[in-house]
């Protein structure tokens, strides 16, 4: 029907509303095909570190902030086995990170004055 709104469900083909130039099936994009470019904070630098709880590597949410402007740039989880985290493809600069304990047993821990370094 004219003016019909297409329904999107997993794995189906999207059909555009019929008109003179539309109506052919359009395949859905796989998320792996979409590339995001960070225009503001992107670059060829990285920042990495390790999260430990009582000396043992731990998986925790780590947030990266630009130190001068104090705004959130990215977030990730540290590895459960090694405690390592990395923020890649960032611009050169000074940052701070905050690690959050999802269990609620510990307060968030911050580390400031971290310098990004060129990616290998």
Image (tube, helix red, strand yellow):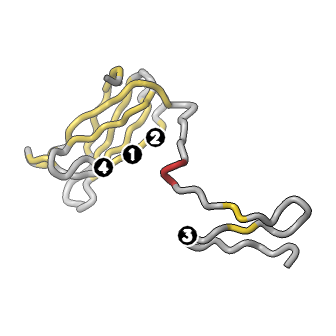
Q: CA distance from mark 1 to mark 3?
A: 30 Å
Q: Which residue is mark 4?
A: 77
Q: Residues within 10 Å of mark 3 (few under 14, many from 20)?
A: few
Foreground of the two, 52 or 19 = 19
Would residue 31 be found to the left or right of residue 54 on screen?
right
Foreground of the two, 18 or 97 = 18
Q: Which residue is mark 1?
A: 75
Q: Residues within 10 Å of mark 1 (few under 14, many from 20)?
A: some
Q: CA distance from mark 3 to mark 4?
A: 29 Å
Q: Residue furthest bottom?
A: 1
Q: Residues within 10 Å of mark 4 (few under 14, many from 20)?
A: some
Within the image, what quadrant is residue 50 found in? top left
Q: What residue is rendered at 85% in x and 73% in y?
A: 3
Q: Secondary structure at mark 4?
A: strand
Compared with residue 118, is residue 28 higher up or lower down, i.e. above or below?
below
Whether residues under marks 1 and 2 lie with C-beta atoms below 8 angstroms apart, the answer is yes
């Amino acid at each position: 029907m004219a003016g019909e709104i297409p329904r999107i469900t997993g794995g189906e083909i999207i059909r555009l509303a019929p008109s003179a130039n539309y109506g052919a099936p359009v395949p859905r994009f796989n998320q792996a095909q979409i590339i995001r470019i960070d225009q503001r904070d992107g670059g060829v630098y990285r920042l990495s570190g390790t999260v430990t709880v009582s000396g043992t590597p731990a998986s925790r949410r780590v947030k990266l902030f630009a130190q001068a402007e104090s705004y959130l740039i990215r977030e990730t989880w540290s590895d459960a086995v090694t405690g390592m985290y990395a923020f890649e493809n960032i611009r050169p600069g000074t940052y701070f990170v905050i690690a959050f304990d999802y269990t609620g047993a510990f307060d968030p821990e911050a580390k400031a004055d971290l310098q990004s370094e060129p990616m290998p």
